[in-house]
Amino acid sequence: MLETLHNLPPGIVGVRASGTVTKDDYDRVVWPLLKSAHAEGRRVRLLYVFAPDFKAFTMGAGWEDMRLGMKYLRMFERCAIVSDVTWIREASQLFGAMMTCPVRVYRNVEEQEAVRWLAAPSEDTVKHRLLADGGVVIVEPTRPLRAEDFDALSLTVDPWIEAKGTLRGIVVHTRGFPGWENLGSFLRHMRFVGDHHRKVARIALAADGAFAEMAPSLSDPFVQAEVRHFGYDRLDDAIAWASRGEPVT
């Protein structure tokens, strides 16, 4: 069975597996936790504890675990797996290497250490904010972009698009484009663009530098949204233009 763990630090979601875990356990415990976080635009720090009497997943539970992981992958900020079961530890380490968020594996006696790691502050993601009145998101990168920056941005953008259908505009405000932390960050950026460009009417670049000036012509073959360049000091003009975006068809 699965049960929700209580009395955890703010921002941590915890579940404990014992005995045999079934699909009904996921429907009853895990789905509501993740759906609530998704609706509220919250990222999840997950504590998944396998009790000493844990025996197995049913086939349905194993499939549900994989399906949940794929559906809500971008919501996870950190994951801590606590278990003494060898195959659980090895599988967690294998799949953790492919996750977009940090994953650590602990033994049962280290459960409190896992909680401390989950609760520890992490580096801030790129600053962004939603102007609800205009239906515009402002993104202000000041350092090389990381994969988790786009995960955090998706958590702001996706619930709005699900509720409204489209986003009028995105405004990128930066002195000079800072680039990407690594290849994985670049690929995550491309996936974000692929997932969202048909649902965003306008993209305004309130930025200085040659890259920002060339971006509208470079993006034209790949991005359905209208893209326009403004200078860094013309943020208000960029917001006003982006907020007039027409619904995407």
Image (cartoon, rainbow, N blue to C red):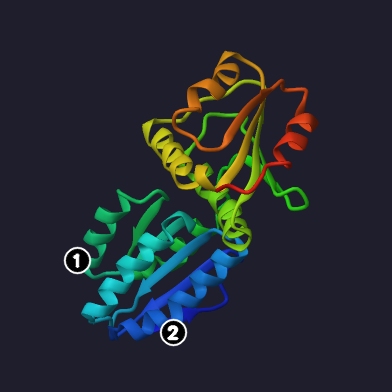
Please tell me how crowded label 1 is: few (under 14), some (14-19), or many (20+) other residues with Cα within 10 Å.
Answer: few
Q: Position of residue 169 (x, y in %)?
A: 65, 42
State the image coordinates of residue 224 (x, y, percent, origin top left): 51, 37
Where is 38 relative to 146, above or below? below
Name the residue located 53 percent from the left edge and 42 percent from the top edge. Answer: 149
Amino acid type, label 1: Trp
The answer to whether the residues at label 1 and label 2 have Cβ atoms under 8 Å apart is no
Residue 28's disc is 2
Q: Nearer the viewer, residue 184 or 216?
A: 216
Determine which of the numbered discs, if any, sits on residue 87 in the image: 1
Q: Quadrant of the N terminus?
A: bottom left
Q: Report crowding for label 2: few under 14, some 14 to 19, many 20 or more residues within 10 A (C-alpha).
A: few
Three-letter residue code for mark 2: Arg
Residue 124, visible in the rendered structure: no
Q: Residue furthest front?
A: 249
Residue 41 picture quarter: bottom right
Q: CA distance from mark 1 to mark 2?
A: 25 Å
